[in-house]
Amino acid sequence: MKRFILHVDQATVLTQGGFTLPPMSEVPCTGPLKAVIKPPNVDDLYDWYMTKEKPDADPSWGVLWPTAVSLSNYIIDQPDLIQNKKCIELGSGLALCGLTSAKLRAKSVVISDREPYALHCALSTAAVNDITTSVEGAIIDWTDESSMVDVAEVIMASDVLYEKETIEAFATA
């Protein structure tokens, strides 16, 4: 299986953003996914949030972080870690790791984030890639114990501990 490579220079803008959805682009990929649906960049996403009068919104979910690419490539190299297993990706953002797992025959995958727009992009990516594995989106904030689900044999997370106050909550999630 080819390793994951994102071809940002070949992105196609799907929408500039509107009343209900943020700006989105389709970015072709090499590897198990043929494309990722994501905001064109963090600045455009932040500007869109500002039009919604949400200055405290966190647009970081709109980035495919290098750690997500690295973990996805590790999963590509070690597919037995996820095959036929129930997986969850915590703080998934664009859900590269979870969707790579789904494409490589995980039994089921829950992609989770506290940001509904991230889940919209991630589930759109699943649709574009004809992912037939059971993929479910869940709004989870690990600082809120009532939002947690316990359905996984494999727990994945990448680049999620950037706020000091969430570290302890994440450790006990």
Image (spheres, grey):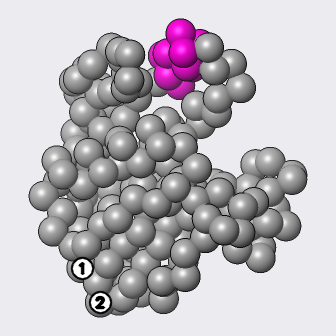
45 part of magenta stretch:
yes
Helix, strand or loop under label 1: loop
Q: Which residue is mark 1?
A: 105
User: Can residue 4 be spotted in the picture?
Assistant: yes
Looking at the image, residue 56 sits to the left or right of residue 148; the answer is right
Residue 57, how many percent across, how many down? 64, 29
Residue 23, how many percent across, how many down? 37, 21
Q: Which residue is mark 2?
A: 84
112 part of magenta stretch:
no
Residue 44, how many percent across, how many down? 48, 16
Q: Nearer the viewer, residue 134 or 106?
A: 134
- At horizontal 27% and vertical 48% (from top left) the residue drawn is 125
* Nearer-N-terminus badge (2/1): 2
Range of magenta residues: 42-52
The type of residue carrying mark 2 is Asn
User: Can residue 71 be spotted in the picture?
Assistant: no
- At horizontal 32% and vertical 78% (from top left) the residue drawn is 108
The reply to whether dot 2 and dot 1 touch (C-beta < 8 Å) is yes
Q: Residues within 10 Å of mark 2 (few under 14, many from 20)?
A: some
Main SS type for the magenta part? Answer: helix
Helix, strand or loop under label 2: loop
Looking at the image, residue 23 sits to the left or right of residue 62; the answer is left
